[in-house]
Image (cartoon, helix red, strand yellow):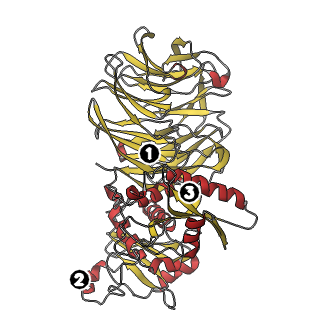
Amino acid sequence: MIRRALAVAIALVTLPLYAQSTPKTYAQELVDQTTAAHPDIIVMAIHATPPKQKDNVIIASNIGRIGKKADSDDMGVVTSGKPLVEVNKAGDRLEVEVPLFDTTGDTLGALSIVYPYKNGDDKQALQQKAEQIRDQLARRISNQGNLTQPYRYDATTPTNTLAQQVVDETMAAHPEVIILAIHATPPGGKTNVIVGSSIGRIGKAADEDDLRAIKTGIPNLEVNGSRFEVETRQLDAKKRIIGAVGVVFRYKPGDDQKALEKQGYAIRDEMAAKIPSLEKLMEPVSGAASASSAPATLIGRSTAWKPEYSGDFDHFGVDTKRNKLLLAAEDHGTLEVFDLNTGAHEKTITDTFSTPHAILYLPAQDRLIVTDSGKGGTRILDAATYKVLGYIALEPGADSMEYDKGSNLLYIVSGGKDVDMKECFLNEIDPLSGKVYRKLRFDSDHVEAVRAEEHGNHLFVNVADKNRVDVVDKKTLKVVASWPLTGAETNLSMALDEADHRLFVGTRKPAKLIVLDTDNGKTVATLDSPSTSDGLFYDSVQKRIYIPGGDGYLGIYQQNDADHYTQLARVPSAKGAKSGMLWKPLNRVYLAASPGDNNKGGEILWYALHP
């Protein structure tokens, strides 16, 4: 245990440290990176049994004590597999000690994390936070020996390169991959080494198998216990050979090796598209060395929730009274309920919905409105019990929804091709009674996002099959202008910067962020964006735009001024994470990763946002 660590911190300075004359171990690098990315951690230590030793000891920490033997509490966590959560005697710190795993789930030792604590703090939330960090570390540990290996085998091989960024992004986008490494000979070098890896070992020289794959072009396909590796030539974007890539998947007898081999090649090709050349591969990438410098940091994912759904998720909503995060599982016909702070899945609301889409919470009435494009239509629910209290009478296909704070009116889009209709409707509704006041018909079978001016008189509507934005006068509920989009099609998502008169539109073909002047509809900026997106969020405080992509990235853009925009980052997320929500009270972005029609799974992820 490390609960007494801070009390003796001064004395520790004089103690001899274990193996400090050798290069930094990989375990120590993991501790250093984690504490930098999570400044709320007071103490972090990894307990494990080094190779050829009998005792379980601290092998890495941010307070020294390297080589200190594990006590009975530490070993209890390792042998039982159960976490230990304890408040110190002073009552100001909470230690969470959890089993530490490798990338295939084998137990390696224990991870201890100490957080600041005061009476009344949520212990379970802190425990889950530590477990999420543990799970993130497990994705980066090959086996027990990996922990005590050097982080860098060769000090001349840089770590904050495009190679490492490509590895990190690919691992985040492909949870099915358990190990990933790029081998190359750096420009001016003579030895082929690991230049980017999910398990450290930077600068480690290639072995004969690595070199043979490069020279002959014949891949190495190998089963190693519960792992299957595909090692093949790595190409750049111009299809030039730059080295080799090793892609490792989980494996059990009977698994389709041909399918895994094909998947390995697809991931190799995905990586190649991001590599302009060998020279660029080895160049430093700004911000790659420190996760804490990124504009958004992954702080949690729903690892304990394993729904095994197929199809798509749609939109989030928030019950602010109960601190609940709500997610419409449209193709599963359910509403998923999570704790907003911890992300823990709490319940699934079944037998209530057909195809739910958008969610609105009305705090004064303690009601939920959930649009539903299937049988029964849009529901009004008691937010405490999730019982249906009523329905809003609309055409089939109710989907997108916008609440106008200025008029206290609700706008819902219905109709369209998904319900075999050749027209769509924009419905003006009293959210308290569910009464439909007026309808606006569109000669379109695909109308998507709607945004309302809070202080103005306009609604902006994405008419996706016509590749245009329609402007609707709220007083007359008639279209007063149509703005065709140039250079992109299928405009699905939208956000509004009313103060600066800017409308942000997300398109699919190709994936673009288009910025329009709401005074005249003129395009003032166009930027590339993550593909297959179903969401677009604007942060009026930080002046940032967030676009989640089904390709596995969260695009983040800075609004420098009303006419100038810069892409800050494409932060790795997960395949299918195309919908989400910006929640400013916690300064977070939540994403929902849809498994798609041909897969099973599903998860949510949440990111802390940084200035």
Q: Nearer the viewer, residue 129 or 469?
A: 469
Tell me which numbered mark, 2 or 3, is placed earlier along the sequence: 2
57 shown above or below 502:
below
Label 1 sits on residue: 554
Say whether residue 209 is left or right of residue 48. right
- What distance separates the C-alpha of mark 1 from that of mark 3? 16 Å
Q: Tell me the number on the disc at residue 175.
A: 3
* CB-based contact (under 8 Å), mark 2 and mark 3: no
Tell me which numbered mark, 1 or 3, is placed earlier along the sequence: 3
- Residue flagged by tag 1: what amino acid is it? Leu
124 shown above or below 362:
below
How many numbered marks appear?
A: 3
- Residue flagged by tag 3: what amino acid is it? Pro
Q: Position of residue 13 (x, y in %)?
A: 25, 84
Question: Crowding at label 2, few (<14), some or many (≥20) Cα neighbours within 10 Å?
Answer: few
Q: Position of residue 120 (x, y in %)?
A: 37, 60
Question: Crowding at label 3, few (<14), some or many (≥20) Cα neighbours within 10 Å?
Answer: few
Label 2 sits on residue: 10
Question: Crowding at label 1, few (<14), some or many (≥20) Cα neighbours within 10 Å?
Answer: many
Residue 363 visible in the current orientation: no
Quarter of the image holding residue 498? top left
Check the image and name the residue furthest to the right. Answer: 254
The kind of secondary structure element at disc 3 is loop
Q: Position of residue 531 (x, y in %)?
A: 50, 39
